[in-house]
Every structure is written in structure tokens, then in C-alpha cells.
Image (cartoon, rainbow, N blue to C red):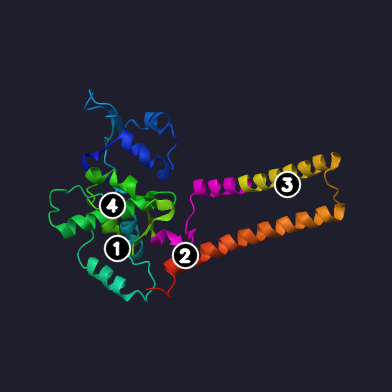
Amino acid sequence: MLSRGRRLQVSKLAALRGPLGLPDDYLLRILPGRTDLFRLANPYPHRRNAAELELLRWVPSLAVSSVEAAASASNSAPQFTCSLPPSWTKSHAKMEEFNSTPYISPYSEKWAVIGTDADAEKRAVAVVHELLSLTLWKKMSVLKLEHFRREFGLAEDMARMLLRHPCLFYVSNRYKIHTVVLREGYEGSELKEKDPVVAAKDRLGELMQEGLHEYNQRRRAANLEKKRRRGEIEIKEEEEEEEEEDDEAAARLDSAEKREERRKFYKVLFNDDNH
């Protein structure tokens, strides 16, 4: 519903599968039960990976952006909100100027009417904002977004457009991968609303860490026992207990340091002390 012509290439849609929480076999699991809404088409049979997913029926109740839904709930006109602290006065002023023109819905199909650069950017910002709000983690690789420039009517230089709107987006270059984050989706370093899929994956990660720690402890104990039997070392029970306690204390300290590092990182991003 966001794309030009109400269709997307299946090969490109695969890039959004993870962020949107779609199963790997969504074409087989979901589409057969939604033949009234979607169909697979191949307008260029002679080309590889040319299959497209086409929307057959427009559903007005679904063509409501998160900005429009929030405005409807508060009985106000739809507009973007700045998620930066009040002390960021220049950014707030730019956001007010950006909101001075009417909001353009990302689901609007009046592509030809949008002729000025300002209107084109307003729609592009709305599209990125809506797309990020639909993702599980409220963030996405900038490179993936650039794959949809033509379909979504996005700017040629996506990174610069995103950086012009710090009230809405934060662009991270962690691990040398440019990622755009929807600021309003986070409270500090935590998602404001966690999808059940995100909560399940977080819990799975915790269980994997616990299992790895337990495995390392068992392996260490087994290695010590082998050395003791060979007579290479002689360790008293008290010393073993002290070493285990030291290891656990070191692990807790390492975890605490990582949490503190993350806290400081997000404090720089979102707290009032920065401009």
C-alpha cells in the first residue's frame, strides 16, 4: 500500500522479511489464505527474479499511518512530533517549520500531484516514518531502504535526508552499518512497546547466554579434574570455590560494565544535556 503501483518485487520484499517479522515461507504460508488481497505476478517472464507481489484490493482501514492514528486519538491535525529534549531548540524550530505545511499521508496515491521538492521530501519522510513504525525493532538498515527508492518515492541520497530530521530519526554507524532508528519508538535504550516476537527473541538470547555460561563452567571443571588425575595440579576444594566465585564476580562486573556503557551511549543520544 506504500508502493507505487501497489506492487513490489518479491526479491526486494525479502529484504524486509526480518524487520517486519515475516516467516521465511510467507509466500506459501500467508498468501494462499489471502487470495482476495494479494496475487503473484510475473510481468517479465524472460527476467530472473522478476516476480511481483500485487495488492488486489485497497483496504481503507489499513491505509492509516501511525501519525494519523495518533492524531485521530488526540482529535488533532496529523503532524510529526519531535522526540528530542526541549533544549534542542534549533531542531525543534526546524520541526515546527517542517510541520507548517500539511501532512502528506504515505498511503496517498496522488503521486503526480507532488511536484515540489518540499512536498516530495515530506512524503518521503512520512514513508520512512511509517515503514519504521511497522518494523519489530523500529529500525532498519539504510541500505535496505535505498533498495526501495523507486517503489516508495524516496530521495536519492537517503542518508542526508534522514540526517535533516534528527527529531524523528537517529542514524547509527555501529559496526560500520548505517542504521536508521525511529526515535519515538525508544525510551532510552529500550523499545517502548515490544512485539511478542521481540520479547521471545530476547528471552531466547538470555537462555543461550545462560546455557553458554553453564557449558563453560562444566568444561572448566572437567579440565581441572583431568589435570588433577594426571597429577599436573593439586587444587583444594576451598581454592576451587574461591576461583569460581572470582569468575562469577568477574562475569557480573563485565555485564555491569556493558550495561553502563549502553546507558551512557543512549544518554548521549536522548538526554537533555546535549544539543
- The one nearer the camera, 149 or 229, is 229
Please state which of the two labelled residues, at mark 1 or mark 3, is closer to the viewer: 3
Q: Pick whichever, 249 or 207, lies toward us.
A: 249
Check if residue 192 falls in the magenta segment: yes
N-term mark: 1 or 4: 4
Residue 37 appears in view: no
Give me the C-alpha separation between circle 1 and circle 4: 13 Å
Amino acid tagged 3:
Gln
Q: Nearer the viewer, mark 4 or mark 2?
A: 2
Q: Earlier in the sequence, mark 1 or mark 3?
A: 1
Residue 144 lies left or right of residue 24; in this view the side is left
Mark 4 burial class by Cα count in 10 Å: few <14, some 14-19, many 20+: many
Q: Nearer the viewer, mark 2 or mark 3?
A: 3
Circle 3 sits on which residue? 217
- Give amino acid for label 4: Val
Give whichever of 205, 81 is nearer the camera.
205
Sequence-first tag of 4 and 2: 4
Q: Residues within 10 Å of mark 2 (few under 14, many from 20)?
A: some
Residue pictured at 22% horizontal, 48% vertical: 153
Q: Position of residue 28 (x, y in %)?
A: 41, 28
State how far apart marks 1 and 2 are (Cα): 18 Å
Quadrant for the N terminus, please. top left
User: Dot 2: what SS?
Assistant: helix
In the picture, the disc for residue 165 is 1
Residue 169 sits inside the magenta stretch? no
Return the mark for residue 266: 2
Sequence-first tag of 4 and 3:
4
Q: Which amino acid type corresponds to the residue marked 2 in the rendered image? A: Tyr
- The residue to which callout 4 is attached is 127
